[in-house]
Amino acid sequence: MSSVWPLSGSFAFEGDVPVFTFTAATRTAVGQLFDAMFVEVDVRYDAAGALAYQLSLADRGLVPCVVPLPAEQIPRLERGAARMNVCPTFVAFPEGERLDLSRFVTDVTHDWSGAYARAWGPFLQGRFTQAGVTLTPFAAAPGVPVAPARLLGRTLRELGRLDEAIAQYRGTLALACRSGTDELLPLAAGVLNDLGVAYKRLGDSTRAEISLLHALHLRPNYPQALLTLAATTLDPSLVLYGCARVLAIGGHDALVEALLASVAEVTHTAAGDWRPRVELCIGEVDLHAWPLARRGLGTLSAIERDLDRGQMTFGPTPAEALANLPARPPRAKG
């Protein structure tokens, strides 16, 4: 974990609106951690068992920064957040500057009751039926936040109820839009990644790839989506580039090693031959640019269209987009 992480967090009311501030020790190092990264906020239990507002750079592999929420303040927090459909959230630096996280927190609603937070315990312990019992009535309510609806989809997926999970994820995407539009919020990338995993387990690699490419349009530095896309397509250029990008992001070396071992087994190549080639490609990675970008993505109507017809919006193939990589995959053994 980075020596400048985690941040120290606090909140205060400005009028009736709760404002969360995470204070950094240094501008340069912390700013680099946030640069080009997706920021996730959530309301879950902290290690002490208190409901807490959490800020996470999960794509960097960092632990969440938490602000415990006093129980007596939660009703006011809920009312204040509902007034503007946002909990304004900032990262404050010693020089007086602030990083405004509006892009990631606007139109993101939370469950302040603790029901969603309680479901995480059994889910992480593998007691998926119990997690589903907690989530099902809550996640079916009108206007439910995205997080519990997504967690119900993950629960159904782990129970092997893939068709139900897919339906749950696709329904959840409708909750993950900017207010009054069909523009998908950045957090919809998590739902799309999970949808891709469900389609992959169902054997529908085409719709898995569609879901993952839509996820990466919203969140191009998403390690799990990058590696799942590489594992789904087994395109050699995408394996090299996806793993190189994940190494450039940092914090997920074990995931890269696991994928390369799996790819080596499937392609009858030597596992040890992949890693040096991946490392040669790291210099080609620009975390601010996504080489497989396509026009017309980022909306609910676009993902529904592509999934319904089972065909991706026109755009570059991995071989076309990644033609200039400085390494080539190893040859098959024998």
Image (spheres, rainbow, N blue to C red):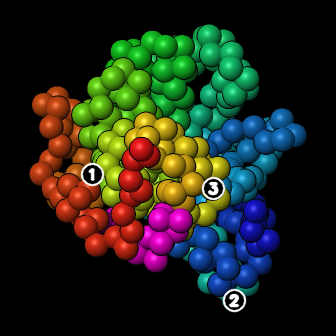
Q: Quadrant of the N terminus?
A: bottom right
Q: Up-down: is 142 above or below 277?
A: above
Callout 3, which amino acid?
A: Asp
Q: Residue at x 66, y 24 (%)?
A: 123
Q: Which residues are magenta?
A: 276-291
Q: For residue 95, which numbered disc appears in the image?
A: 2
Q: Is residue 106 magenta?
A: no
Residue 118: name its quadrant: top right
**Residue 298 marker:** 1
- Nearer the camera: disc 1 or disc 3: 3
Q: Amino acid at mark 2?
A: Glu
Tell me if 289 is positioned left or right of 160 in this view.
Answer: left
| Quarter residue 18 falls in | bottom right
Is residue 172 visible in the rendered image? The answer is no
Q: In the rendered image, is residue 28 in sight?
A: yes
Residues 122 and 270: in front is 270
Query: Where does residue 256 sit, x and y in percent of width and height?
Result: 56, 51
* Residue beneath the point at 49% across and 13% down: 160
Report, in whole angstroms, how far the alpha carbon at label 1 lies from the one at label 3: 29 Å
Residue at the (22%, 52%) spot, across then down: 297
Q: Quadrant of the C terminus?
A: top left
Q: CA distance from mark 3 to mark 2?
A: 34 Å
What percent of the width, then of the height, locates residue 222? 48, 53
| Contact flag, marks 3 and 2 (Cβ < 8 Å) | no
**Mark 3 element type:** helix
Between discs 3 and 2, the one toward the N terminus: 2
